[in-house]
Image: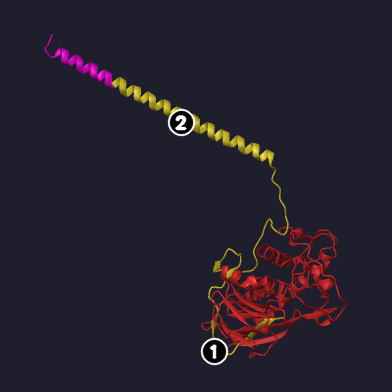
Chain colours: A red, B yellow
Amino acid sequence: MTASTSWPALGTNATVVVADPAGLAAACAGVQAVIEEIDRAASRFREDSEISRVNAAAGAPVLVSEAFVRAARCALRAAQITGGDLDPTVGASLRVAGYDRDFVLVGPGAAVRFAGAAGWRVVELDDERRLIRVPAGVELDFGATAKALAADMAAARASMRIGGGSVLVSLGGDIATAGPALAAGWSVRVTDDHAGVPDAPGQTIALRSGGLATSSTTRRRWTRGSTNVHHILDPATGAPAREHWRTVSVAAACCVDANIASTTAIIRGAGAPAWLEGAKLPARLVAVGGTVTVTAGWPAGERAAA
Amino acid sequence: MSPHAPRHGSIEAAEIAGRRAVMARDAGLRRISRVTRRVILGAVALSGGLAVTAANAFHGHTIVTGSSSTTSTPASSPSVPSSSSSGLSAPAQTPAPTPVPPVVVSGGS
C-alpha cells in the first residue's frame, strides 16, 4: 500500500510516493527543503538566485553555497562525460533563443540568430573555497541537470527522514528512488508528457532501483519568426537540436545519470542507441514518427507509439 | 719416505688447488656483487637526478576549471552498481514490464 501527493515546484510538479503511508508528511518535508535549496541556487529566473548573481558578476569570482557547488559540479560532470553535448554555459544561447523567463511567460517573437555556447571549460570552480568564476558575457544554465540532481537529493533526504523507508520522488518526470527496493518495483508510465494521464500512449514499467528520466522535444516549444523552437539546444550552434527522437526515457543508477543520458540522446540523434548500448543504459527512444527503439534490456513494448 | 708420501703430497696439492679455486670463485662472486651494487646505486642516483631535472624543467600548476577540481566529487549516486566507460552508471536492475497501474508518469517537462 503506497501513498502519494503532488504539488507545483520548479516550474513543474513534484510528486512523492512512499511505501509506508505513515511517512508521507515527513518525506514531503524533506523533499520540499531540497527543492528550495536547489531553486535558490540554480533558478535562472529568480533575481535573487545564486546563478543569477554569478551570471551578473562580469567575470568576478563569486562565493556560493554548497548546494550551488554541487549543482555546478554536477553540470560540469555532465559536460565532461558527454564531450560538451550538455553544457552549462548554454544560458546565453537559451536567452537569445527566447527562453529568458519562466516558460509560462515565453511567447512568440521575432526571428533570432542562434548563438553557440561559450564552452564549459571556461568555468572555474573551486569546490573547497566555494568560489566560481565565469568570464564576462558567459551565462550559466543548469537546466539539463539541476532538476534531476534535486530529485536524487530529495529522495535520499526523504528516505532518511522516514528512517530509511522506500521513497520515490518525481520532479517533472525526473524520477529518483531511495530506500529498500520494492519487491514489485515502482510502477511508472513513460510517455511524451509528464503531465499526461496514466494511460497516455507509452509503456508502463517497474522501476526497481536508481533513477529514470525522460527528455522530450514535445514540451516547452515556442516560435521565433517562422522557426519552431524547442528547449533542448545543441550547445555547438545554440539552435534547437535536430529532431530525430521526440522522446527518450533512460534508466540509470541515479536520476542525474538517467537525465544526462536522455537529454544527450536527443542531441545525438541517430547515433544515440549505439551510445546507450555501449553505456549499458536501458532506454526507450521514440522517433518523431512514433517508431520505438529500445536498448540494453529495456523491455520490449509496442513497436510504435501514437 | 713412506710409500704413501708422494700420494699424500699429491692429495695436499689437490686440496690446495681446490682451496685456491674456491677462493678464486669467492673473490669473483664478491667482485660481481660489488659491481652489481654500484650499478644499482648508479641507476638510483641517475633516476633521482633525472626526476629533479624534470621537476625543475616542468613546473606543476593547479588549474581549477570545469574539467578538474581539488575536491571533485561526482553527483549524488544513491547506488552505483556498475559503471561503464561512458562515465554513467547503469541501474542495478533493468526496468521490467508490469501490469500494475502506474503511481507516477515520466515524460517531457
Residue B14: name its quadrant: top left
Horizontal and vertical percent position of residue B20: 31, 20
Q: Nearer the viewer, residue B108 or A124?
A: B108
Horizontal and vertical percent position of residue A133: 79, 59
Q: Do labels 1 and 2 share a chain?
A: yes
Q: What residue is at 60 percent from the left and 88 percent from the top?
A: B102
Q: Residue A155 carries which label?
A: none
From where the camera sits, is residue A23 visible?
no
Q: Residue B99 carries which label?
A: 1
Horizontal and vertical percent position of residue B73: 65, 62
Left/right placement of residue A139 relative to residue A260 reads right
Residue A101: name its quadrant: bottom right
The chain holding disc 2 is B
Residue B29 to residue A113: above or below: above
The single residue placed furthest to the top in the displayed view is B1
**Residue on which the image places disc 2:** B36
Residue A57 to residue B32: above or below: below
Mark 2, other Cα within 10 Å: few <14 / some 14–19 / many ≥20: few
Label whose residue precedes the other's in the sequence (1 or 2) = 2
Question: Does the magenta segment cover residue B45?
Answer: no
Q: Alpha carbon of mark 1 to alpha carbon of mark 2: how far? A: 76 Å
Q: What residue type is labelled 1?
A: Pro
Q: Give the range drawn in magenta.
A: B1-18
Question: Does the magenta segment cover residue B14?
Answer: yes
Q: For numbered disc 2, what is the local secondary structure? A: helix
The N terminus of chain A, quarter of image: bottom right
